[in-house]
Amino acid sequence: MSRADKISGFFWLFLGVLVSIEAYRLGLGTVRRPGPGFLFFYIGIFVSIMALIILTRAWVARKIESEKIFRGQNVRKAIYVLISIFLYALLMEPLGFIPVTFLLFLFLLGFVEKKRWAVALLTSVAVTVAAYLLFETALQSQLPKGIIGFLRF
Amino acid sequence: MGTLIGTLVGVLPGLGPAAAIALLLPSTFHATPVSATIMLAGIYYGAMYGGSTTSILVNIPGEAASVVTCLDGHKMALKGRAGPALGIAAFGSFIAGTFGVIALSLTGPILSGVALRFGPPEYFAMMIVGITVLTYLSSGSMVKALLIAAVGLILGGVGMDAISGKYRFTYGLQVLADGVGLVPVVMGLFGIAEVLENLETEIRRDVLATEFKNLLPTLKDWKDSAAPIGRGTFLGFFLGLIPGGGAIIASFASYAIEKKVSKHPEEFGHGAIQGVAGPEAANNSAASGNFIPLLTLGIPCNAVMAILLGALMIHGLQPGPLLMTKAPDLFWGTIVSMYIGNAMLLVLNLPLIGLWVRVLKVPYYLLYPLILLFCLVGAYSINNNAGDVLIMLVFGVVGYLMRKFQYDAAPLVLALVLGPMLEEAFRQSLMLSKGDFSIFISRPLSLAFLITAALLIIIPIVTQRKKLATLEE
C-alpha cells in the first residue's frame, strides 16, 4: 500500500500543481469579480496539499509486506480488451456500426477468449444483428453508417 | 407503457433517464401533450428503477443516482440475497414514489416559495455539505476521498466557463468544449473499470449458481427497512425540491444518514439492507420532488427536467405558475399518472426479477462483451459523437487505476455533477457581496450548512486520533 500511495501521491501532486498553474493563466480576477481560474487555482493547491499528506503518510508508515499492485494474472487479457474497445471507439465513425461491432465480438470471443472459430463467428453475427435491430430499428438511435452506408438498411 | 420501456432502458448501463427520454422523445410527438408527459414521467421512473437493478446485480450503476445502490446492493447479491435487494428497492421506490406524488400534489405551491429564498451562498454551502457527506461515508482514507472530490470539481470545470465565456482546460479538443460529460465518465469509471478489473482478477460469479428462492424480502428485512424508507422518502423529497438538488444528492445523503443512524454501521458497504432501502426511497421521492420546480416555476433542476421542459414547449405548453391555472388538467393529470406509474413499476418489476436474474446467468465471457457493447453504444448515443465513447474509455482506465490504488470513485462523480453549479454559486456569492467572504457565514442557512460540513471533516479525524491513542497504550 505504501508504494502504491507514493506513486499516486506524486501523481496527484504533479496534477495539482499543473491545475493551479493553468488556473492562474486563465486569470484569477479579483475577489470582487472572480475570474475563470479563481476557484480552480485554490482547488489545485488543495489537491497538492492532500497529495502531500498522502505522501507523508506513505513515507512514515511502517513497511507492510510489499503488495503487488497488479495482482491478477490476466493483465494481458485486460489490456487486449482495452485496446480493442479503444479501436472500436476510434473506428466507429469511419467504418460504421455494423462492421466494428462484428469485428469486436469476433476478436473478443475468438482471440481473447479463445472460443472455437465457428462459435465466435456465429455469435458475432447473431449479436451484431440483434444489436442493430435493437438500437437502430427499435430505439432509433443514429448509429454511424460508415463504409457500408451505401447499403441503406 | 412508458414505465416498461423506461425500465428496460434504465437497466442498460449507460442509458440513463436523460438518454432514455432523449431517445424516446420523437415517439411522443404523436401523442397529446398530457399523454406525452405521462409517458415521459413513466420513462423517468422506469429508468431510475432499472438503474438500481443493474447496480444490485452487476455492480454497474445504470445511472448516476444508482451509484449508491451499488455499494450495499451488490454485496447483498454476492451473498445470494439479490432477490430481497431488488424487492426492497422496488417496494421502497414504490412507497417513496407514492408518497412523493401525494406530497407533490399537496405541497407544490407552498414549497416552491421557500426554495426560492435560497441565494447563491446557500447553494454553495449546501453543495459543500453534499460533497463532504460523501467523503465522510467513503471507504478508505478520507484524505483520498477529499482529493478525489477535488479532482471531480476540476473535471467539472472543463469546458466553457459560463460567466466569462472562456474555454477552460480544453486544450483545443473539440470534444471537451462542452465539458467532460457525466454519463461517459460514470460509465467509464464504474462500467468499464469494473469489467477491466474482473478480467484481470477473474472473479468467479458463483452467486449465479444459487437458486433465487426468496424473491420477496423477509419480515426482518421489512422491519429493518421501514425506517430507512421513511427517512429516505422525506429526505429525498425535500432535496429534490431544491434546484440543483435531486436524486443523486438525495441517494448519497440518505446513505450517509442511514449509516450514521444505524446501530451496526460496520455492516454498511457489506450488504446492509438499509443501505439499499433508504437511498432507493430517497431517489424516487427526489424524482417526484424534481417535478415541482418544473411544473410550478418552470425551472428545471437537472438535465432530465430540462429535457422535459423542452418537450413540453415543443407541445406548445408553457410550464410555470400559469400552468396550473391555464392547463390544470395537465398538472393533475401528470400527478395521477405518476401514481399509476409507480404502481406499474411495482407490478411489472417484481415478476421480472426472475428474468433479470437469469440475465446474469449468461456466462461471463459472453456477458462482458455485451456489457461493453452497451456501454459503447450508450456513450455514443448521447450526442452521436464517438468522442464521448473515448472519454468513457479514458475514464474506464482511470477508474481501473483508481481501484488498484485504492481511491473511491464516488466523490468524483458527485463533485463532477456539482462542480459547475458550485463554482457558479461561489462566484455569484462573491459578486453579490462585492468580495466579502463573510457572506457565507453571515447568512444563517449558509452558516449552518458550512458548520455541518466542517463537522463531517473534523469528527473522523478526532475519532481516528482517539483510536490511535488507545492502540498505543
Image (cartoon, coloured by chain):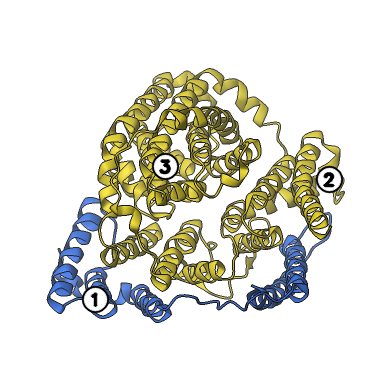
Q: Of marks 3 and 2, which one's residue comes earlier in the chain?
A: 3
Q: In this view, does A24 lie above or below B435?
A: below
Task: Give the residue type at disc 3.
Answer: Met
* Left or right: residue A52 compared with residue B226: right
| Residue B372: % across, % down | 34, 65
Residue at image location 15% in from the left, 66% down from the top: A152
Q: Circle 3 marks a residue in which chain?
A: B
Q: How far apart are marks 1 and 3 (CA)?
A: 33 Å
Three-letter code for the amino acid on which mark 1 is drawn: Leu
Q: Nearer the viewer, residue A29 or B227?
A: B227
* Residue bearing the label numbered 2: B433
Image quadrant where residue B343 sits: top left
Q: Position of residue A61 (x, y in %)?
A: 75, 72
What residue does disc 3 label? B48
Q: Quadrant of the C terminus of chain B?
A: bottom right
Do the numbered discs 1 and 2 sit on residues whose CB atoms are within 8 Å? Answer: no
Q: In which quarter of the image is residue A40?
A: bottom right
Distance from Cα at disc 1 to Cα at disc 2: 59 Å
User: Is label 3 in contact with label 2 (beta carbons under 8 Å)?
Assistant: no
Q: Please say if B28 is above or below A79.
A: above
Q: In this view, does B220 lie to the left or right of A84?
A: right
Q: Measure how far apart labels 3 and 2 are at the Cα level.
A: 39 Å
Left or right: B206 as drawn, with respect to B102: left
Q: Position of residue B246 (x, y in %)?
A: 55, 40
> Would you name the residue on which mark 1 appears?
A103
How many neighbours does mark 2 have within 10 angstroms: few (below 14), some (14-19), or many (20 or more)?
some
Colour yellow belongs to chain = B
Mark 2: amino acid: Ser
Pinpoint the chain carrying mark 1. Answer: A
Q: Can residue A49 be seen in this view?
A: yes
Q: The blue chain is which one?
A: A
